[in-house]
Image (spheres, rainbow, N blue to C red):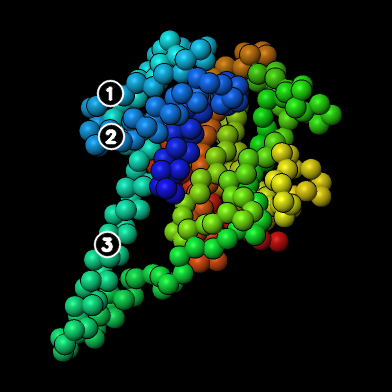
Amino acid sequence: MAGSLGLNKRFTQTVKNIVGEDEFYHLRKTKGFEEAMNQFDKNIKTAFRGDPDEDYYVNFPMAKLLDDPANSLVANCWNMKGDDVKKIFQPLITDIERMVQDQLNLVLVKRLSEGHPKTNEIRGAVLSQLPQEAAITSTVATKHLGVAANAPYDEREDRGQPTTTNKYTGKQKVSKMTWYIHRGEDMQRDQKIVFSFYRSLPASYTPSMLIFTNNLLESPLDQAPPDPRTGSTTTNCKLTADLTGVSKQHFEPKVGLVDGTPYVDISYDLVVSMKTAIMKFSLEVEGVEMGSVEASYD
């Protein structure tokens, strides 16, 4: 189940990367997106066999999406290539391969301990590679955990909230929470949680501008708050993401709607690996680990 939900989240993020943050904000509330998610969940996930040349078609009925031939999105239909699906599956495949290897190591240790003399060094070497907390399989989250990000302003939902104006698009933005872990949720060991971030920089950006600081927020309230209001959320840790080593081919060039200023959109994921009571962070761009991230707790 955890693997299936992870695939759905990665599919959602892939769609968001293609259509853009503003259009995705409205798309995700539509029946068209619900139908597309259902197609991926019920048909594409079960049919995928790893063939990079296989084609899959995802429909977004009545979604009124802008055509994007470069990303194979035409007439509210996205032609997913086998490689697109493989990128979504890759983290799950890697986890399965690791678990299989762990099981093979356990079998080897068992056989080494069944009456074979002079195997202490081998057995110790194998055991040193095995998880030391294997007996603990899950824990329950005591707080909500998530991130705040700028989202398009909705007059009905966000009236009275502080707003900012995007200097490239001219659109109003408001800070909203996305909760990835909810209080009381059963969290599996070795679970991976992906926090998605989105930044815009001038086309003439300098390397120092590719170092971003993000706060991982928490809330002890029974109901997770929709925005990071004072008193409802506190900082769990500060995450510093360094993308200076990431090739610019991963950044999407755009032209501002306000005055034609060129800029780039940068999408990246901060990935949390749960291991006992410790969170290990890594940085991914388009599903591939690159760059670096450091967590600091004040």
SS for dot 3: helix
Q: Callout 1: helix, strand or loop? A: strand
Q: Which mark is residue 48?
A: 2
Q: Is residue 279 above or below residue 27?
A: below
The quadrant of the picture occupied by the C terminus is bottom right
Instruction: Say above or below: 36 vs 220.
Output: above
Q: Residue at x 55, y 40 (%)?
A: 196
Q: Tell me, for residue 101, which label it has, or none.
A: 3
Q: Amino acid at mark 3?
A: Gln
Task: Identify residue for label 1.
Answer: 55
Is label 1 in contact with label 3 (beta carbons under 8 Å)?
Answer: no
Amino acid under disc 2: Phe
Tag shown at residue 259: none
**Callout 1: few (<14), some (14-19), or many (20+) C-alpha neighbours within 10 Å?**
some
Query: Is tag 1's residue or tag 3's residue first in the polypeptide sequence?
Result: 1
Q: Is residue 240 visible?
A: no
| In-image side of 279 versus 68 (left or right) | right
Q: Residues within 10 Å of mark 3 (few under 14, many from 20)?
A: few
Q: Check disc 2: other Cα within 10 Å, few if <14, some if 14-19, many if 20+.
A: some
Residue 31, horizontal then vertical, whole percent: 53, 21
Q: Nearer the viewer, residue 132 or 268?
A: 132
Q: Tell me the element at label 2.
A: loop
Where's residue 6, x and y in %? 44, 44
* Residue plotted at (58% across, 46% down): 180
Question: Residue drawn 22% across and 83% down?
Answer: 113
Question: Would you say residue 134 is visible in this rendering?
Answer: yes
